[in-house]
Image (spheres, rainbow, N blue to C red):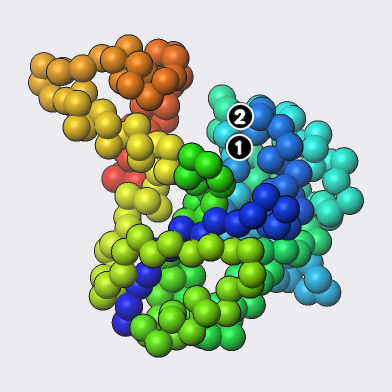
């Protein structure tokens, strides 16, 4: 059994997903990860998505979208989880169809990433080498694939990525490398913030959220 972690990017005019495209119109809300997407019936899909930013703005946009059937957002302090029933299309439909046709398992979650010049999705798939190769060949025009890593699948791989978002992992990795968790500490919130181009308050808040998630996962 093999796994492949892939970064998928697309041209600006490619319809990715109606709701994700809707939220991308504002800088107040960011889609961090897709925990799950799946068909329900009669062209309806259900999603579980992690959001950061102004959750009230997300509620207003979703309530006004003709693609929204039903939704609920839980969370506070700039982080929430969206449950959504919607009419969907675009890249998400194509991706799920290709994986189903080639009998490939998608290892949730899917992450939205910023490659610097364009946005994309990072996903890990599990199956045979031949099935993964054939699926890659069926990706529609306008979609680019970059293989990050591939190898034998191990049951405990990717545990950290299932707990933290990409943004949180980036900060946590930097904090560990710079000695934030050493005794005594070898760096400060301010120094981490300067390296990432963030405010000190943002770094402090994100580290607290990271630590809360990691402790919660350990306890569970």
Residue labelled with disc 2: 53
As drawn, is 44 to the left or to the right of 11? right
Does the rendering let one see residue 150?
yes
**Furthest-left residue in this view:** 183
Q: Position of residue 27 (x, y in %)?
A: 66, 29
How far apart are labels 1 and 2 at the CA level?
6 Å
x, y (%) of residue 136? 50, 76
Instruction: Tell me the SS state at disc 1.
Output: strand
**Residue found 70% across the figure and 57% down from its top:** 14
Lower position in the chain sequence, tag 1 or tag 2: 1
Drawn side of residue 42 relative to residue 198, left or right:
right
Q: Does 105 sit above or below residue 22?
A: below
176 or 142: which is nearer to us? 142
Q: Tag 1: Cα neighbours inside 10 Å, few (<14), some, or many (≥20)?
A: many
- Residue 214 disc label: none
Please give the count of numbered marks on the rendered protein: 2
In percent of the image, x 29 and y 15: which residue is there? 191
Q: What is the number of the mark on residue 30?
A: 1
Residue 124 vs residue 184, the one in the foreground: 124
Answer whether labels 1 and 2 touch (C-beta < 8 Å): yes
Q: Where is 125 relative to 83, above or below?
A: below
């Amino acid at each position: 059994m093999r796994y492949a972690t892939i970064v998928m990017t697309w041209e600006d005019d490619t319809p990715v997903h109606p709701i994700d495209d809707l939220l991308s119109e504002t800088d107040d809300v960011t889609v961090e990860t897709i925990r799950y997407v799946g068909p329900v019936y009669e062209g309806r899909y259900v999603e579980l998505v992690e959001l950061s930013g102004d959750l009230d703005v997300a509620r207003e946009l979703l309530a006004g979208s003709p693609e929204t059937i039903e939704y609920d957002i839980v969370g506070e302090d700039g982080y929430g989880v969206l449950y959504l029933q919607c009419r969907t299309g675009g890249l998400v439909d194509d991706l799920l169809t290709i994986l189903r046709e080639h009998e490939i398992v998608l290892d949730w979650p899917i992450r939205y990433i910023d490659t610097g010049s364009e946005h994309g999705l990072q996903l890990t798939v599990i199956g045979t080498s031949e099935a993964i190769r054939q699926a890659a060949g069926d990706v529609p025009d306008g979609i680019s694939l970059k293989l990050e890593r591939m190898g034998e699948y191990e049951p405990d791989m990717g545990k950290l990525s299932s707990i933290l978002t990409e943004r949180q992992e980036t900060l946590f990795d930097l904090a560990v490398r710079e000695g934030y968790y050493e005794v005594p500490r070898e760096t400060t919130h301010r120094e981490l913030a300067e390296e990432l181009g963030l405010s000190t308050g943002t770094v402090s808040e994100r580290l607290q959220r990271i630590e809360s998630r990691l402790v919660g996962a350990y306890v569970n």
